[in-house]
């Protein structure tokens, strides 16, 4: 929407020249594929000086701008191109500042004595060679003695620590052993008890390992010379030659989304790339993936009769097989958008701001060279930044809102698991009672376990479990942070008691809170969204569990274009298969059924027979578990009924 008055144009000019802090964050990577070209008016009535009140107004305007962007983008048709850049510059910058002592450390504290002695002796030999003197000359006697004594002292302390650790292990073993343990009992109950004790012992060993003191507490083995070499190799042989991108179109009115991701690796003497076209038919609930990339592997391992039947074909996976309630797909999409809005609304105003395009040049770590020129074309940039805790809180708001919306609309999807299982296995139980279970019954029970409705129930169950755990985690988070700080201080206090000199990690957390996710929304002079950039900073902790801020940085830039910029959704595919249909696609469920019948007849590859055998075993175990749950549920109902009847009898007697 063009800006028709000078007030709006002057507001844009004001926003383009605002000088505000540069760190930004994001709400959800899911909206990356759903953002659209759109018009968002950015207006402000007057020039705003940098005061708390005006900063609040700017934050409010930035938040509203992003919210309006999310609202309008959902109905826009557009083409997009996404590129991903991964950077290790945070870690490389830390390695560049490493002290000589840090660089001289070993890869593990247990190897410290021998490693540092060898490094020091090599340095002495180099010094002697430079001076043209033999290393065993009397000139270096004192230095050789110092190296020897330092090593012997270090080794003595290491052996004492190792002896203490071994003695502690033997004591634990003796406490857990008795004469009765030597008697062999082959009963099923004894085997079950033994299995339980084994699991408990493993848990106890894990807890003991965590509580066991380190040889050199707080040992810094992440800024050594080997770390520098590894970081250089990672940059030269993976991050720099690797390229990840995707392009496609978004047509909400047609219910179609195309995605064409490409992974490419290019060095001086090697170039390889793979492209995997994907087509989403949201209207019918179908997902299509290009079959050619899987045909060779499937024919070699599973289907020796496949041949070239998958050439120039799509593989179709129906996400709704008819078992879900009518209108579920439409309501799921609506609930998804409503949950995104609720997540954004819950965010604090402190997360939002406008920044000037020039500030993009000073972001740390620097933006990728392939991203910065595109981003600098924006006239104004709205941003949001989130720490790890606020990002997780926003995700939980999204999941909770989505869960509540779906379960309120379709309460049958959150029936008690036992009740749902009983409903699924009624027919199977009836057949089992008279010993008439047939292949048809098994097929019916298998189908019941893998329906869209059953999968939806399982997903909702996982969301519920995650939200319940998140509530507990949130309550314990403060205690964990305090405990981590206290443990770090105790470890370094112990380190101060040793006479061994070594580099220690810092007990203080990174003064700059980790920006888990950052977002930039770039608009042109007419307030139209041009691009969106999301930056995720991955966490990295030192040996004391303290965040260092040295993790990888992942930048995802999506450039929005008019639909005419991508006239062909899949440039690498023939024109006749640009849109999947019944003639150029293979239904995965139908194919899997026919392949199963092929193996039931005794045919197939050896690898396939193993896989189908394991799958059959899993299905049998799942059916048995479902029957068991069904019986437990029915027994519970019977028990409750008997209890009610007993109470009734007592009342009648009285």
Image: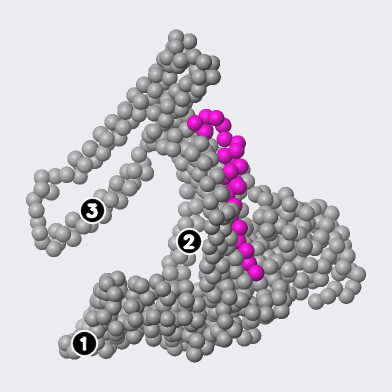
What residue is pinned by disc 1? 437
Quick one: 206 or 360, which is closer to the camera? 360
- Mark 2 and mark 3: Cα distance apart in space: 30 Å
Q: Is residue 346 left or right of residue 544?
A: right
60 magenta-colored: no
Q: Quadrant of residue 354?
A: bottom right
- Mark 3 and mark 1: Cα distance apart in space: 37 Å
Q: Quadrant of residue 244?
A: bottom right
Q: Which mark is residue 470?
A: 2
For the record, the magenta segment spans: 81-104
2 or 3: tag closer to the N-terminus = 3
Q: Residue furthest front?
A: 269
Quick one: 69 or 275, which is closer to the camera? 275
Give coordinates of residue 393: x percent, y percent.
Answer: 56, 61
Element under label 3?
Answer: helix
Q: Quadrant of the C terminus?
A: bottom left
94 magenta-colored: yes
Query: Which residue sits at x=58%, y=75%?
Result: 572
Q: Are marks 2 and 3 in contact (CB under 8 Å)?
A: no
Element under label 1?
Answer: loop
What residue is pinned by disc 3? 198
Give coordinates of residue 282: x percent, y percent.
Answer: 55, 82
Q: How many marks?
A: 3
Q: Residue furthest top?
A: 138
């Amino acid at each position: 929407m063009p800006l028709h008055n000078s007030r709006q144009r002057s507001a844009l000019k004001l926003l383009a020249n605002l000088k505000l802090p540069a760190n930004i964050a994001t709400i959800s990577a899911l909206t990356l594929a759903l953002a659209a070209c759109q018009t968002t008016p950015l207006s402000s009535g007057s020039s705003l000086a940098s005061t708390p009140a005006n900063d609040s107004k700017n934050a409010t305007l930035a938040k509203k701008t992003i919210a309006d962007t999310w609202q309008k983008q959902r109905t826009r048709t557009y083409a997009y191109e996404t590129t991903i850049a991964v950077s290790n510059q945070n870690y490389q910058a830390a390695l560049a500042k490493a002290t000589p002592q840090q660089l001289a450390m070993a890869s593990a504290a247990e190897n410290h004595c021998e490693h540092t002695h060898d490094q020091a002796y090599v340095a002495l030999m180099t010094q002697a060679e430079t001076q043209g003197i033999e290393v065993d000359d009397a000139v270096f006697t004192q230095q050789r003695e110092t190296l020897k004594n330092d090593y012997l002292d270090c080794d003595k302390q290491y052996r004492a620590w190792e002896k203490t650790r071994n003695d502690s292990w033997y004591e634990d073993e003796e406490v857990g052993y008795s004469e009765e343990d030597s008697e062999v009992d082959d009963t099923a109950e004894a085997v079950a008890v033994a299995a339980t004790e084994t699991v408990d012992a493993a848990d106890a060993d894990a807890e003991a390992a965590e509580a066991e003191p380190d040889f050199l507490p707080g040992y810094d083995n992440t800024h050594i010379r080997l770390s520098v070499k590894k970081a250089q190799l990672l940059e030269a042989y993976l991050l720099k030659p690797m390229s990840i991108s995707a392009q496609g179109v978004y047509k909400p009115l047609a219910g179609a989304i195309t995605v064409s991701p490409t992974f490419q690796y290019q060095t001086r003497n090697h170039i390889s790339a793979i492209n995997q076209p994907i087509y989403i038919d949201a209207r019918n609930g179908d997902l299509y993936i290009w079959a050619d990339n899987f045909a060779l592997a499937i024919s070699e391992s599973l289907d020796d009769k496949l041949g070239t039947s998958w050439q120039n074909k799509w593989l179709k996976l129906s996400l709704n097989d008819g078992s879900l309630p009518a209108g579920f797909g439409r309501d799921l999409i609506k609930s998804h958008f409503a949950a995104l809005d609720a997540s954004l609304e819950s965010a604090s105003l402190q997360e939002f701001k406008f920044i000037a395009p020039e500030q993009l040049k000073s972001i740390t770590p620097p933006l990728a060279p392939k991203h910065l020129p595109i981003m600098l074309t924006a006239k104004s940039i709205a941003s949001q930044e989130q720490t790890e805790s606020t990002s997780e809180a926003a995700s939980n708001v999204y999941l909770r809102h989505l869960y509540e919306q779906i379960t309120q609309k379709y309460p049958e999807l959150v029936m008690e698991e036992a009740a749902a299982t009983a409903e699924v296995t009624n027919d199977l139980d009836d057949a089992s009672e008279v010993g008439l279970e047939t292949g048809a019954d098994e097929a019916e029970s298998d189908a019941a376990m893998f329906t869209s409705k059953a999968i939806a129930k399982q997903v909702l169950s996982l969301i519920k479990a995650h939200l319940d755990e998140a509530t507990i985690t949130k309550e314990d988070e403060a205690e964990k942070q305090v405990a981590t700080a206290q443990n770090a201080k105790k470890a370094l206090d112990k380190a101060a008691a040793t006479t061994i000199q070594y580099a220690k990690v810092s007990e203080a957390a990174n003064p700059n809170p980790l920006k888990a996710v950052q977002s930039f929304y770039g608009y042109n002079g007419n307030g139209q969204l041009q691009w969106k950039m999301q930056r995720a900073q991955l966490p990295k902790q030192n040996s004391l569990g303290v965040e260092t801020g040295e993790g990888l940085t992942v930048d995802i830039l999506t450039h929005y274009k008019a639909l005419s910029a991508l006239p062909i959704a899949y440039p690498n595919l023939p024109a006749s298969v640009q849109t999947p249909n019944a003639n150029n696609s293979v239904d995965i469920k139908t194919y899997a059924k026919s392949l199963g019948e092929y193996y039931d007849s005794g045919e197939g590859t050896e690898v396939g027979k193993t896989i189908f055998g394991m799958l059959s075993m899993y299905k049998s175990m799942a059916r048995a578990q479902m029957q068991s749950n069904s019986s437990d549920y029915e027994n519970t109902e019977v028990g409750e009924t008997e209890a009610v009847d007993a109470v009734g009898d007592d009342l009648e007697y009285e």
